[in-house]
Image: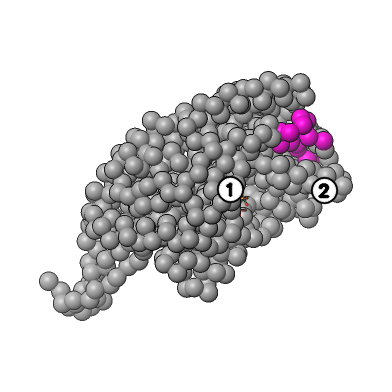
């Protein structure tokens, strides 16, 4: 099956209602503040909609300014004693939390899939990925334990460089990977000795609760991790709260700019992981069969809703036609359907608004005369669900909107290049600078091409984040990095103490 039949919707609805009925968190009235379930001071709620069916199955409070106040106060109160624990003690807590997250893998995955439509094959790995991130940061505790003493140049004095936790951190996440994109902030923050207030995205406010449950089970003290739900207005209150010491944000570039402006005004440290429009360069010696096996994960992972995926394929004339055929066949054969079905490759996009936005780009590509080789349907395949037909556009020119703007849906664009230099120039021609891949059989030559691509990360014949290595965007794709020692440093503030040499 490559396109959903209208008759599937009844079956889909029944399956999804039954799945939602098994979940502990659906309609919740509380926030998590200071280790307790606290009712919001407001009465407004946000609904949680299953994008596969269009049905509402959950709701959460929309956090108010006084809710944010209470959460920040709880984080502030918990800070001194958490910061006073040794890094080894905090690392042990992260390891216990990792185990506790893994015990919740299934319920977390189903909740996540019903929130944002990510295929269960994707969300099924969310808990183990979160656990891996927690364990990687736990393994970095020696960086905080070992004394860092630096002699003055040519002098008798020395400096002890201490690394203090930065304080109370606001962690603001998007909806595409609601667990991973919190844990990537939470793990270094906790290891550093910071306390946090998490603000998940409106479509995905429930799966995050399993992370807080895991933290409770791991014995992480009350107030170290607090949760306030709500939309952009709640996020903005949190970003601007006077008692927040640092903001870590993943989301769109326009919202990132707004947060950066607020943090600039407040002189508040901020990490921004923003949008992308990454490119895969296909060199003349690329192995297209091998590329086919990683195509979906590299270029349209999570129904095209992944920040770093290479949605622009740039090929030289030698491989262009063969590439178009391979991509068309691979995408055309991938299963579109119920995201709860483990065999599904493409589920719905996360919201009806996202579906409309992606459809707008499909229309724009058609209007600009890009050639549709598969997909391109401009009517949603089923009523209620936010499905978009996976679409490949060939013969795209770099100035088309579909080649320049982040679409965040299952759409691939294929751009012809004159030669490798032209391919590199095209790949560097957007305002973004997040990811990318170079496909080529001579991996040393491909590596050299990768070094010419102006992005924060890039892969040779595959792309994956390495939790030990920095991940971040250049230009409109962000400010600062996550993962690795560099990601940990973002939650630390150094103090240099100068003294006589011992
Ligand atoms: P978004 O920017 O609309 O929202 C992200 C979060 O910010 C949400 O929690 C939202 O409620 C909150 N928010 C909105 N306005 C705010 C404001 N004024 N102040 C404070 N918080 C505010 O992004 P999205 O649509 O949820 O996510 C998709 C985007 O995220 C895409 O652009 C994608 O590329 C990007 N993303 C980037 C990375 C990365 O690591 N670079 C990873 C995943 C997603």
Q: Look at 28% across and 58% down and name the residue there.
A: 83
Q: SS class of the residue under badge 2?
A: helix
Task: Give the residue number, with chain letter if any, for mark 2.
Answer: 364
Location of residue 109 in the rendering, given as x and y in whole percent from the top left corner: 51, 32
41 sits left or right of 315 in the view: left
Residue lying at 36% horizontally and 52% vertically, measured from the top left: 34
Give the alpha-carbon distance from disc 2 to disc 1, as whole Å: 35 Å
Question: Is 210 in front, or is 318?
Answer: 210
- The residue under label 1 is 45
Q: Is residue 243 magenta?
A: no
Left or right of 181, for residue 406: right
Relative height, residue 404 to residue 347 (above, below): below
Q: Which of 316 and 472 is in front in this view?
A: 472
Residue 268 is situated, as x and y percent measured from the top left of the image, at 46, 69
Q: Classify 488 as above or below 54.
A: below
**Furthest residue in direction left, as rendered:** 502
**x%, y% of residue 425?**
69, 56
Chain part drawn in magenta: 379-394
- The label number, if any, that marks residue 121 in the structure image: none
Judge left or right: residue 322 versus residue 460. right
Q: In which quarter of the image is residue 410?
A: top right
Foreground pick, 225 / 445: 225
Magenta stretch: helix, strand or loop mostly: loop
Verify CB contact (< 8 Å) between mark 2 and mark 1.
Answer: no
In the rendered view of the protein, which quadrant contains the C terminus? Answer: bottom left
* Mark count: 2
Q: Which colour scheme is used?
A: one colour
Rate crowding at label 2 as few (under 14), some (14 to 19) or many (20 or more) other CA atoms within 10 Å.
Answer: some
Quadrant containing the N terminus is: top right
């Amino acid at each position: 099956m490559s396109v959903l039949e209208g008759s599937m919707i009844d079956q889909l609805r029944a399956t999804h209602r039954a799945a939602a009925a098994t979940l502990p968190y659906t309609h919740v009235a509380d926030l998590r503040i200071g280790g307790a379930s606290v009712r919001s001071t407001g009465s407004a709620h946000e609904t949680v909609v299953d994008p596969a069916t269009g049905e509402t199955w959950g709701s959460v409070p929309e956090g108010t300014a006084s809710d944010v106040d209470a959460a920040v106060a709880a984080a502030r109160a918990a800070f001194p004693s958490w910061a006073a624990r040794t890094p080894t003690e905090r690392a042990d807590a992260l390891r216990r939390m990792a185990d506790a997250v893994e015990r919740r893998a299934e319920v977390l995955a189903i909740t996540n899939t019903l929130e944002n439509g990510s295929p269960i094959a994707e969300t099924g790995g969310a808990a183990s990925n979160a656990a891996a991130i927690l364990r990687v940061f736990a393994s970095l505790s020696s960086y905080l334990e070992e004394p860092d003493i630096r002699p003055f140049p040519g002098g008798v004095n020395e400096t002890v460089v201490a690394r203090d936790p930065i304080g109370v951190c606001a962690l603001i996440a998007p909806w595409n990977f609601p667990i991973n994109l919190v844990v990537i902030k939470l793990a270094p923050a906790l290891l550093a000795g910071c306390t946090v207030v998490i603000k998940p995205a409106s479509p995905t406010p429930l799966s995050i609760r399993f992370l807080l449950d895991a933290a409770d089970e791991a014995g992480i003290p009350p107030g170290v991790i607090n949760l306030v739900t709500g939309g952009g207005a709640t996020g903005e209150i949190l970003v601007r709260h006077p008692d927040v010491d640092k903001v870590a944000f993943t989301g769109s570039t326009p919202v990132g700019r707004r947060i950066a402006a607020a943090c600039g005004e407040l002189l508040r440290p901020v990490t921004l992981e923003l949008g992308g429009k990454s490119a895969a360069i296909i060199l003349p010696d690329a192995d297209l069969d091998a590329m086919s096996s990683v195509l979906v994960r590299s270029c349209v992972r999570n129904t095209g809703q992944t920040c770093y995926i290479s949605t622009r394929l740039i090929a030289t004339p030698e491989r262009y036609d063969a590439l178009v055929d391979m991509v068309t066949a691979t995408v055309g054969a991938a299963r579109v359907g119920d995201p709860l079905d483990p065999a599904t490759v493409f589920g719905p996009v996360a919201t009806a608004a996202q579906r409309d936005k992606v459809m707008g780009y499909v229309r724009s590509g058609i209007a600009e005369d890009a050639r549709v080789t598969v997909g391109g349907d401009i009517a949603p395949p089923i009523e209620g669900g936010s499905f978009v037909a996976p679409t490949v556009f060939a013969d795209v020119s770099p100035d088309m909107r579909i080649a320049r703007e982040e679409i965040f849906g299952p759409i691939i664009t294929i751009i012809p290049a004159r030669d490798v230099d032209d391919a590199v120039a095209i790949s560097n021609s957007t305002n973004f600078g997040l990811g990318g891949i170079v496909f080529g059989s001579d991996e040393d030559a491909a590596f050299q091409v990768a070094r010419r691509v102006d992005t924060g990360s890039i892969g040779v014949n595959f792309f994956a984040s390495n939790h030990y290595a920095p991940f971040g965007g250049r230009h409109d794709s962000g400010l600062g990095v996550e993962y690795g020692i560099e990601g940990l440093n973002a939650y630390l503030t150094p103090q240099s103490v100068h003294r006589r040499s011992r």
